[in-house]
Image: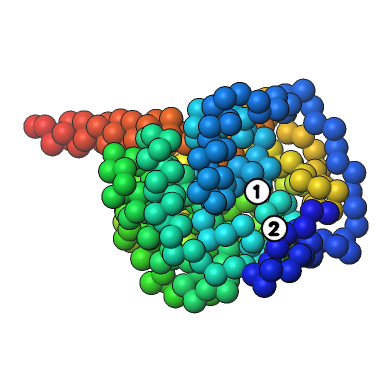
Amino acid sequence: MHTIIDAKGRERPRHPHLANRQEHDVMRKPDWIRVKAPTNKGYADTRKIVKDRGLVTVCEEAACPNIGECWEQKHATFMIMGEICTRACAFCNVATGLPKALDPEEPAKVAEAVALMGLKHAVITSVDRDDLADGGAQHFEDVILAIRQASPETTVEILTPDFLRRPVEVVHQVVDARPDVFNHNLETVPKLYLNIRPGARYYHSLRLLERVKERDPKMFTKSGIMVGLGETQEEVMQVMDDMRSAGVDFITIGQYLQPTRKHAPVDRFVTPEEFKAYETIAKSKGFLMVSSSPLTRSSHHAGDDFAKLKAAREAQEAKRGAKQEAHQRP
């Protein structure tokens, strides 16, 4: 397995928690999941901007299949607070271990990269930082504010950790920094949490999304799940209902892809037709926006989706206003 350099400068396995885990065959991907290797100039330009500033992207660390398409268009999802996560999720390719100290210059570096790329919509995510008293809330706020200063017209979407066992005030702090979209992924159905997301708690993550809406009812909230891990369709629909009860506006549903033989195996590849059915069901449940396809990821087409999300809310509010006006007529 790949190695990383930890906070003390020592070489460590990328996934130490998987060292003794049983290996699983990596299933051959069906034709509808295959993507081309990135080779274009746009990809190279984006990579240079990221590397020259010592920044980390989830596109690379999580081995996202859409990296070629997104980086060609100079769209990158920045992963702040380092490249080493304190969690050990069985689905994730991000390195696990002891993180390094926060880089106080990172907010300015991210903001500079956003401005250089000319991003209209910036997506910021992070590793889990259970070692920090606030879980990284202050750093999220600093990055958001730095982007606002460097690129005032850019909208900002954040994909946060769960701030587990942290006071609710840290969530309020991030919300009060006024990102345009607050995203936190549930990732999978409740029954699979122990094996797939052992460091997290399903109902805590759900409550986090609900708290965002309580703090700022107008803020767009977003959450996503992977399928193909052994869940049933009924369980996916229950997650949809749970999200709607928490006021989530936007749901993403994508195929789980196994990063290595040591990670959780793919149970099955969900067909494009099934993803389309999930999209139809989710729309019927009242989500403002639904992205459901084999290659859907949280930040894939995020800028275009944000524009659609705003338009959907405006249409919903206009419809509601027209109904109220009709009821008030004599």
Residue at 63% x, 62% y is 85
58 or 239: nearer the viewer = 58
Measured as percent of width and height from the top left, residue 218 is found at 30, 49
Three-letter amino acid code at the position of disc 1: Glu
What amino acid is found at the position of numbered circle 2 in the picture? Ala
Residue 247 is left or right of residue 28, and the answer is left
Q: In which quarter of the image is the C terminus?
A: top left
- The residue lying at 57 percent from left, 74 percent from top is 131
Of residues 278 and 54, the one drawn nearer to the viewer in this rendering: 54
Where is residue 296 shown, x and y percent of the image?
Answer: 60, 35
Placement of 102 over or under 328, stated as above or below: below
User: Of helix, strand and loop, which one carries label 1?
Assistant: helix
Density class for disc 1 (Cα within 10 Å; few <14, some 14-19, many ≥20) is: some
Mark 2 = which residue? 95
State the residue lying farthest toward the front.
Answer: 52
User: Of 56 and 9, which appears nearest the observer?
Assistant: 9
Residue 232 placed where, x, y %?
A: 72, 44
On the question of residue 245 being in view, the answer is no
Which residue is drawn at the image coordinates 85% and 37% (left, top)? 27
The reply, left or right, for residue 162 in relation to residue 68 is: left
Quick one: label 1 or label 2, which is nearer the N terminus?
1
| Residue 292 higher or lower than 182, as above or below | above
User: Residue 310 at x, y = what percent?
Assistant: 34, 35
Where does label 1 land, which residue?
A: 61
- Whether residue 25 is visible: yes
